[in-house]
Image (cartoon, rainbow, N blue to C red):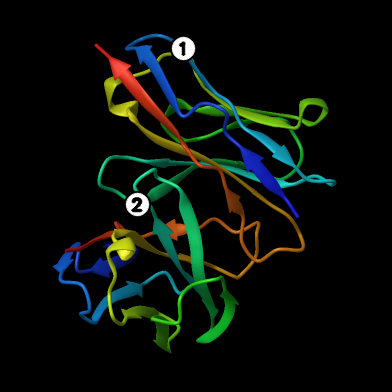
Amino acid sequence: AQSVTQPDIHITVSEGASLELRCNYSYGATPYLFWYVQSPGQGLQLLLKYFSGDTLVQGIKGFEAEFKRSQSSFNLRKPSVHWSDAAEYFCAVGSGGSYIPTFGRGTSLIVHP
Amino acid sequence: DTAVSQTPKYLVTQMGNDKSIKCEQNLGHDTMYWYKQDSKKFLKIMFSYNNKELIINETVPNRFSPKSPDKAHLNLHINSLELGDSAVYFCASSQEGRADNEQFFGPGTRLTVL
């Protein structure tokens, strides 16, 4: 069975600073990897996903993520954070044998002006 | 147009009451889900239906009963509400019931049990 870990519960950055949110997964084969964002009072929205191919994937809102098989990681990055990026970010991992992905417990991003 | 909608957005009720949350998707998806998000933002799958048939039923009290009248709707009925049922409930849908499918989430229903 797959599992996913987001080691940071909260991350605080200043507006304009770069951002990296960590995600580590456990699965034997190449997993399906996702990042979702949940803005306050909203449902989750897909930012980006990785299944195969180029290990650096681009998503919406200027986000990107890099799949590193050797580190079992799929970290989310953004070069310059905007105040509107303050939200909860969820990493999720799926496998061919499951119906749905497993979600991490989320990382709360706080953006200081 | 709202892709996945839920009603109501807020639900405040007394312990012991019975309540329902409705969910509709207009994406033509085959699979729908109910998730519970606790106060620490942890997201837990409760149920999944594929073409009106139950495919996932996690360890959830039998006070919770999903009903899917057609593949565009998945309602959640909760009997004898308890304090611990207070949470945000999200409905979601995907094209198929597969782990590589993007899930589309509704805006959530915040349930408060007093």
The residue labelled by disc 2 is A43
Please say if B17 is above or below A109.
below
Question: Mark 1 and mark 2: span between their CA atoms?
Answer: 25 Å
Residue B50, position as x, y percentages in the image: 56, 79
The residue nearer to you, when weighing A106 against A100, is: A106
The residue labelled by disc 1 is A18
Specify few, some or many for label 2: CA neighbours under 10 Å numbering under 14, 14-19, or 20 or more: many
The residue nearer to you, when weighing A57 against A95, is: A95
Which chain is mark 1 on? A
Which chain is mark 2 on? A
Q: In which quarter of the view is residue A84 placed? A: top left
Seen at 34% across and 51% down, the residue is A43
Image quarter in which the C terminus of chain B is found:
bottom left
Residue B1, position as x, y percentages in the image: 26, 62
Amino acid of disc 2: Gly
Seen at 70% across and 30% down, the residue is A73
Q: Which mark is residue A65?
A: none
Specify few, some or many for label 1: CA neighbours under 10 Å numbering under 14, 14-19, or 20 or more: few
Amino acid of disc 1: Ser
The residue nearer to you, when weighing A58 against B73, is: B73
Q: Name the side, left or right, on which B58 lies relative to A2.
A: left
Q: Is any part of residue B68 visible from this angle? A: yes
* Label 1 secondary element: loop
* Label 2 secondary element: loop
Seen at 37% across and 71% down, the residue is B25
